[in-house]
Amino acid sequence: MKLELFIMEIEKKLCVILFSLISLQSNAQILTVRQQQDDIDSLYSKIETVMPYPFRYIKRGQFVHMVDSLKKSITSSNATSKFYLNIAQLFAMLKNGHLYIEIPINERLKYTNEGGKIMPVRLYLDHGNLIVNFPYRDCGIARGDTITSINDVCSNEIVKKLYSLQGSEINNDLKDKGMEQYITPLLWYIYGWGDEYKFRIKNHGYIKTIYASGVPNQEAIKMINTHKATNRDFRVDYLDKDSAIMTIPNFYQTKELSVFCDSVFKQLRDKKIKLLYINVRDNLGGKSSNVELLLSYLRHPAYDSFRKVIIRVSKETIIYYKRMDQDIYNEIKDLPNGKFFELKSDKTKSNKHNSNIFKGKVIVLANYRTYSAASYFVHMIAKHHIGNVIGTTGCPSVCSGNPIQYSLPNSHLNCYIPTGLFCE
């Protein structure tokens, strides 16, 4: 059973904001009051049709009241970006990290393609702080500086608005990781900042004010390519003759993970490594089948992948599973819409007597940015006593997954709605 993670696919699309050179011919789409209200109703209806138990963190009546309040508050036409900020904030209240509305890009693309400037620094979020990743040009701001305000808007207010656009089950750490690709375009949508900036920054305990101009998009692209991250690479580092640390940045690269495990676990056996740390901190997930691939190289007892998986039958879920999982499709294809189907997982046999597995001590490193399939890996390690765990994941033991993509009828915003509820 695959626990599909959509974040990587979203990241690829969001990168278009910075890297696309497409010239848009039309102005930003303007939505009427009725179109905005209809899109809100459409998404709400689709969630209730497709998603099993969406109201796990908020009462249904309370959420319905919030939906009605937002619809009543819309009294004028709006650009798609403005509507996105409203609808994303509403549905983030469901506190589900797998329920996601993709940010619109057309207005941003048109702006940058027509010569619009962007913020001169690349930022990231870290536990409620705005931190400089790197500047796009020399402007007196350095990597690691903490931003305390931008254009006289306090960073606490900025971060609060960013956090409000994405749901998460436990805390905001997941949002720190999930939002790092698109903080700049979101700030442009929220505040309209472009040409000139006034930064208040903190460095080594000192506060100073920096005035800086925006930079052309192409200049930013060059610097991004220079600082291109390599943290998605699978790797192993040997700490001493007896211990090693393995870094698993994701569970979506099936071929790469398979090749890596075949090679590295042979090395671990040859070097007679006795202690293996497996680092899945900041790993947002991927496929549960890849979790089971990694587990197959570690000594484990017989286990069930999931206690159960709950699927709400609908036209959309039937279409999804016909494409993604033929066995589930055959089980649900003739069931009535609205029925809940419970899938029991098959038991995986013990591999304790396999001579090719790692038989030393295992310690898994996790944090609140360990999510989805990566969180499942951590929970399996602990539950079946395969190793010890240091840290806590950002995903509960009952978690949504396997999202469908749904495009809203008027704004055409892409939404991702979970079809399964996975109970470990």
Image: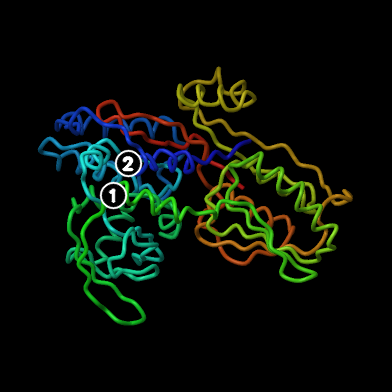
- Mark 2 and mark 1 lie on one chain; the one further toward the N terminus is 2
Query: Can you tell which mark lies on residue 186?
Result: 1
Residue drawn where x is 80% and y is 43% of the image? 349
Sort mark 2 into few (<14), some (14-19) or many (20+) by Cα contacts within 10 Å. Answer: many
Percent position of residue 308, x then y: 62, 40
- Rendered residue at 19%/38% (across/down): 71
Q: Is residue 167 left or right of residue 232?
A: left
Q: Residue furthest top?
A: 334
The answer to whether residue 102 is left or right of residue 7 is left
Q: How far separated are the C-alphas under marks 2 and 1?
A: 8 Å
Image quadrant in which the N terminus is located: top right
- Residue toward you, 328 or 79: 79
Q: Amino acid at mark 1?
A: Leu
The image position of residue 180, as x and y in percent, is 40, 54
Image coordinates for residue 200, horizontal then vertical, percent: 24, 71
- Look at mark 2 in the image and give the residue it sits on: 103
Numbered-mark total:
2
Say which element carries label 2: loop
User: Is residue 67 shown to the viewer in this render?
Assistant: no
Q: Position of residue 369 (x, y in %)?
A: 50, 57
Could you tell me the amino acid type at mark 2? Ile
- Neighbourhood count class around disc 1 (C-alpha, 10 Å): few under 14, some 14–19, many 20 upward: some
Looking at the image, what colour scheme do you see? rainbow
Residue lying farthest to the left in this orientation: 76
Residue 81: quarter of image: top left
Q: Nearer the viewer, residue 8 or 213?
A: 213
User: In front here: 38 or 138?
Assistant: 138
Q: Residue at x 14, y 43 (%)?
A: 73
> In which quarter of the view is residue 271 placed?
bottom right
The answer to whether mark 2 and mark 1 are in CB contact below 8 A is: yes
